[in-house]
Amino acid sequence: MSKMSKTLFQKVWDAHAIRDLPSGQTQLLIGTHLIHEVTSPQAFAMIRELKLRVPYPHRTFATVDHIVPTDQRSEPFADPLADAMIKDLRRNCEQFGIRYFDIASGKQGIVHVVGPEQGITQPGTTIACGDSHTSTHGAFGAIAFGIGTSQVRDVLATQTMAIGKLKVRRINVDGELRPGVYAKDVILHLIRILGVNGGNGYAYEYGGEVFDRFTMEERMTVCNMSIEGGARVGYVNPDAATYAYLKGRPYSPKGAEWDSAVARWASFASDANAQYDDLVTFDADEIEPTVTWGINPGQAVFISENLPDPNDAPLDERASLIEAYEHMKLEPGHPIRGTPIQVAFLGSCTNGRLSDFQQVARFIRGRHVAPNVKAIAVPGSQVVGAKCKELGIDRIFSEAGFEWRDAGCSMCLAMNPDKLVGDQLCASSSNRNFKGRQGSPTGRTILMSPLMVAAAAISGQVTDARELFGI
Amino acid sequence: MALKQIKDVRGACVVIAGDDIDTDRIIPARYMKCITFDGLGDYLFYDVRFNEKGLPTSHPLNDALYKDATILIGGRNFGCGSSREHAPQAVFRYGFRAIIAESFAEIFFGNATTLGIPCVTATRSNLNSVRERVAAHPKQEMRIDLVLQTATFGDEVFPVSLRASARDALINGRWDAIGELLEAGDLVARKASTLPYFQAQSVVV
């Protein structure tokens, strides 16, 4: 392999590797550290207990997202545990001099929405956060991954962590997506085919014509769910779309520094002749709107398909399918479309960005959420929420019968008051359909694209959005 | 920091059936509303251990036969999902000292190793065989030898494996890296000085 044939992963790794550790892992510099209220309190407690310092506080950025209510946000919060968590984060950031996007800042939101929109997320950087969806930031050509709380401590105290190198799988999606097929469908399809553990030990490099044409927000949707396919890291090489998105953002380089930053960023892109550990190619034309039916994101079907028969699965996988059917109360062989829903959730770090709400708003104008369906729209950040208000999008949602909320993770994982009740079935634009994920142990989740969520909300059942909206 | 050298783990076993056991299953998100890890063991597998009325289910962790188990036997892709360290913390605080499974999710594996919980893998057929034997002999102890990379259950010995870096870290007592990481302050400063974005000070917005 010639010196010039490196992947972005390798180049970023080399630029941040401090040294080899005796275990064989690498001590890696984490240039950008993002924290939130759920996985950082114990890390700060350990810092205090071990009497450690935070030597580079300007490279950690904080916000509050998981536990914040999306309706009544005055403090103290009704939930005393949630109230204790926001106050603990505030205190920790103050004590250690960490920039914190609090609710009063107008910039609070889901950490994976805030980082990019503030321009903190940049190409050629390493980004760690105590949250598995940190892979989102890979959309910018960063090596970004989730870490545990002990590693949050490590990054706070040393700005480094111990980590083993990943292999790189290049995933090409070539051709053109059909109308009504979106980034969410692409990643759900990839996970369905490659498996929920197919990416274990890999970083996924996404490319091909579809990714070349994707907007940054579409790239973020795909990279976000890399971890649902087992890949801790997912990224797209930086290009003109990346630089256009970043230009003028609060933390983006300015003036003369901008040009040198762009040149540097471009140099991190994978070389044309880079060698990959694996290569997979998909044909965009084969992808249809995809929805999950089971209890992991790989248990998915095209909207036109009937549900799979466990007897067709390998013998040792049947138990998992049967467990999924029992939880979901669905029947093998039946179509997924027509399945009644009770709740629709539009939001999350996967699909809670401006373009998600803009796209749905175009189609729901003049329509209304079905009776008996509770539909909530939760912007991924206060900035997204404000932009939606400015464009009148919030009103379109409200008039269509959605509850328009304030920013947070909300019903993606239901650590705040937004929860399913009993065995309610939720059409959700989020990223996980695990048992109990949306706050009720018997609650049920069907993952889908934002427009499919809107179609389900309006028709009261899982629906092909292309037919309902005439796409 | 002197850490215990973990060269082997002995203990009774309990089988958690199924593949893709995710972190929400291991510790439901609502129990992450806390600012310490204390007490998390009580909520391990909570939503499958207790029904909606809070009554115990037939989950193996509720079975008195397995109450002394310290080795958890899982399936494929154990610990998939979130990066929450709360999951291995709950496993550890409940009393488990090792997990043996067909495979582990990447982040869970790293988090567990950092807590000194060996996560070793075995083949599906060996795991199926040991599951049957555990059901027949629930009090029998297993011995997982990290040096030899074997597991012994009664007269059955089968190979287990562990990523080389994790094995090295556990058997040499350096599974929590903080001590080593702290030694390299000068190298970190030097590397950071080569990265323009690292130099950027927080901007006032």
Image: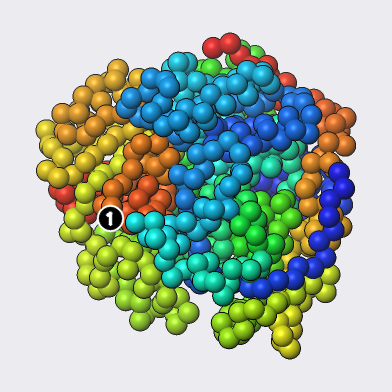
Q: Nearer the viewer, residue A384 or A273?
A: A384
Residue A237: image location, x then y, percent: 57, 41
Q: Amino acid at mark 1?
A: Asp
Residue A327: image location, x then y, percent: 33, 64
The residue positioned 47% from the left and 68% from the top of the image is B59
**Colouring style:** rainbow
Q: Is residue A12 left or right of residue A130?
A: right
Q: Nearer the viewer, residue A425 or A194?
A: A425
Q: Report if residue A102 is visible in the image.
A: yes
Residue A437: image location, x then y, percent: 41, 50
Q: Nearer the viewer, residue A426 or A259?
A: A426
| Residue count near mark 1 (Cα–Cα under 10 Å), binned few <14, some 14–19, many ≥20 | some
- The answer to whether residue B131 is above or below residue B41 is below
Image quarter for residue A381?
top left
Q: Is residue B35 left or right of residue A216?
A: right
- The answer to whether residue B178 is above or below residue A82 is below
**Circle 1 is placed at which residue position?**
A423
Residue A329: image location, x then y, percent: 27, 65
Q: Is residue A458 left or right of residue B7?
A: left
Task: State which chain disc 1 sits on.
Answer: A
Secondary element at tag 1: loop
The residue positioned 51% from the left and 71% from the top of the image is B63
The residue positioned 71% from the left and 58% from the top of the image is B117
Quadrant of image for the N terminus of chain A: bottom right
